[in-house]
Structure formats: structure tokens, C-alpha cells
Image (cartoon, rainbow, N blue to C red):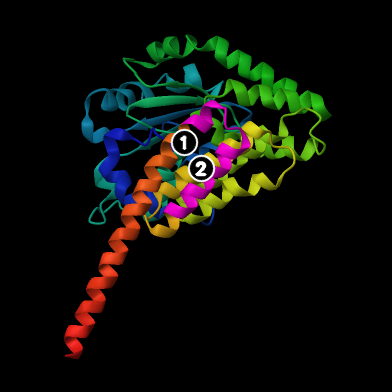
Amino acid sequence: MKKNVLKKFAPLFALAVFALALLSACSKKSAPDTYGIYNDFDSALSAAQKSGKKLLLFFTKLEDGGLNEKIVNDVLHASDYNEIFGNEFETCCLDFSRERFSKKSENFDEAKNDRDMKVAVIYGLETAPAVMILTKQGYVITNITYLPAENPEELSKIIELDRKSIDDMDKLLAEIDAAKGLDRVAKIDELFEQTNANYRYQLRAMSDEVIRLDKKNESGLVGKHLLARASTKAMECYLRRQPDKAVECYLEPLKSKFLSVEEKQRSYFAAAYITGKNDMSVENSKKIIEYLNAAIELDPQSQLAERCRFLLERQEKILANQIETEAKKAEEAEASAENSAE
């Protein structure tokens, strides 16, 4: 899973994140509130796609007061908010106050809670208040994690600091739309490289397109995007609470002839890493050792191979201890059985 998993809300995530159903039934579309603000991400994204506008995605935790209350009461609910932002943006605000996640709450809505948690996870939310500027497709342009704005005009000035990033993204997406074949592959990869690794989940369809458009790997980019898709598929497995299948996501690309030696090493390393996050058993320890050895054999001189050797030595010690512990348990069980028989 991602490193940035809503650190301030860790207890909340511990209960909810693995209960998500990423591919659950589609939610009913909801209308914006009286201020023109959506409180459902899917509905806001759909509106952005219809209007062609970008999307301002706010995360708040109103129970903390302070800047959280200020951004809602003094900015989003200000009479001139839509006048300032409405022509360019749709707006969505998701609140993560703990009360709404309590089943005792009269406002408890499990389906919406799950949907909002999914958004928080895939957009790597760390703290609130925060706002992300998204394209109409949901790609991240920039993430603003501090909002000292007293009113919409001040927020507008903060957003204008990222105007170049906004314009550059608009230009690149227009170029992608106009490009065909390998030119389109190159432009998609440019978007991929310009996107922070934490936000590449949203580009999964783009990686699929690279793989589909470049069947002979003429660009040399197919291996990279096979690994990118492995990463997003693995994340989906974790969100469905199927970590064992996450490992398979990284083993699958190894069947492709388009992966470089380095990319194959990374696949094996990821498989070992994810296996290590599962239940520690003798079987899993043996799998980790198998994956690490496979990575080392591909290129023993690489920097990643050096790291794999370090981890391999540690894992072999863990396995030896596991086998010894299991042997002792077996002896104790056998002795107990003999005593019972007597």
C-alpha cells in the first residue's frame, strides 16, 4: 500500500481501509448542495467530465475546527465562491470527521463512507484540510496541503501559484488527444513521468493504452507500463483484502518478453516485498527467498541485487528460526499425545 495513508486518521483507516469494495456497485449520482458543492466524488467527477471543467477536491475534518471550519464556512460557503471558481472548476468536498464513521451516528452511511475512504486512499490523503486540483479525468495536477485562505479570493491567489502546472497539464492532455500511434504512446509516457508516483493509480487506463497501442514494444516503454499496471492491480487487491493476489500481479508481467532485466528484477523484488507483508509462515519465507534469488540471478552486479542479498540473508535466518520453532512444536505435540495415551 501507499506510504501516505492518512497518518492523522490512522485509527479510522485501520477499521475501514480493508473493508472497502473498490469495484462495488456504482453509487447513485448526487446533486451539489445549495452552495454548488458536491459531497460525492463520483458525482463531481461525472459533472466535470460533462462540463469539461477541472475539479477542486477538498478534504476536511470539521471536528478539528480551525482551518477546517474556515475553509468550509468562509471559503466554500461564501457568496462569491462560484463567481470566482465556477467557470473553471467543479468542486467536491469530503469530510472525514470521526463521528460520521460511527454506526451510532444518525448520519451513518456505510456505502458513502466506503466510497469516500476509497477516494482518500487512492489520492494518498495525509492530513486535512487539503485540496487537490484535478483534471476532468481525475488526474492530479497539484496537491495543496495548507490552506490559510480567509475567503475565496485568497484561495484563488493560492491556486494561481500553480497556474503554470495547470496550463502545462491542459496543453499535454490536448497533445495526447491529438496524437496517434507511437506519438500518442510517447505523450502518455510524458504524462506518466510528470505525475507524482503517489498519483499514478489514476493513469491506469493510460498504461493500458500504451500496452495496447505498442504491441511490438517499438517505444521500449511497454515494460514500464506493464509494471505500472501491476502496481495499480496490486493496490486494488489490497483494497479488496486479497493480498495473496497482489503478489500474482507482479509475477504476471514476468511472462512478457518486453520487460528489461531491471524491470524483471523489480517485479521479483515487489513480489518478495508483498509476500513479506502477508502472514509470516515457512511457506511464505520460502517464497520470499525464491523471489529474491531470482532477482539476484538476473543481474548479480546491480544495486537492487545488492539489496536483495541483504534481505535474503535476513530471510534465511528467519526461515531457520521458523523451521526450528515448528520442529519444537511438533515434538511437544508428540510428547503430549504420548502422555495422554499413557
**Nearer to the camera, 312 or 25:** 312
Residue located at (60% from left, 30% from top): 136
Please provide the residue range marked out in magenta.
285-306
The residue identified by callout 1 is: 309
**Nearer to the camera, 175 or 219:** 219
Where is residue 137 drawn, in percent x and y?
61, 33
Residue located at (29% from left, 71% from top): 330
Give the prevailing secondary structure in the magenta stretch: helix
Crowding near the residue tagged with mark 2, few <14, some 14–19, many ≥20 C-alpha atoms within 10 Å: many
Q: For residue 200, which quarter of the picture?
A: top right
Q: Is residue 47 visible?
A: no
Q: Is residue 55 above or below residue 118?
A: above
Q: Is residue 208 above or below residue 54?
A: below
| Kind of residue at badge 2 | Leu
Q: For residue 194, which quarter of the picture?
A: top right
Q: Is residue 288 magenta?
A: yes
Q: Which mark is residue 292?
A: 2
Instruction: Please state, as top left, top right, bottom left or bottom right, where the N terminus lies in the image.
Output: top left
> Cβ–Cβ below 8 Å for labels 2 and 1?
yes
Cα separation between marks 2 and 1: 7 Å
Where is residue 92 drawn, in percent x and y?
45, 33
Q: Is residue 263 magenta?
A: no
Q: Is residue 279 above or below residue 291?
A: below
Which of pointers 2 and 1 lies earlier in the amino acid sequence?
2
Q: For residue 8, which quarter of the picture?
A: top left
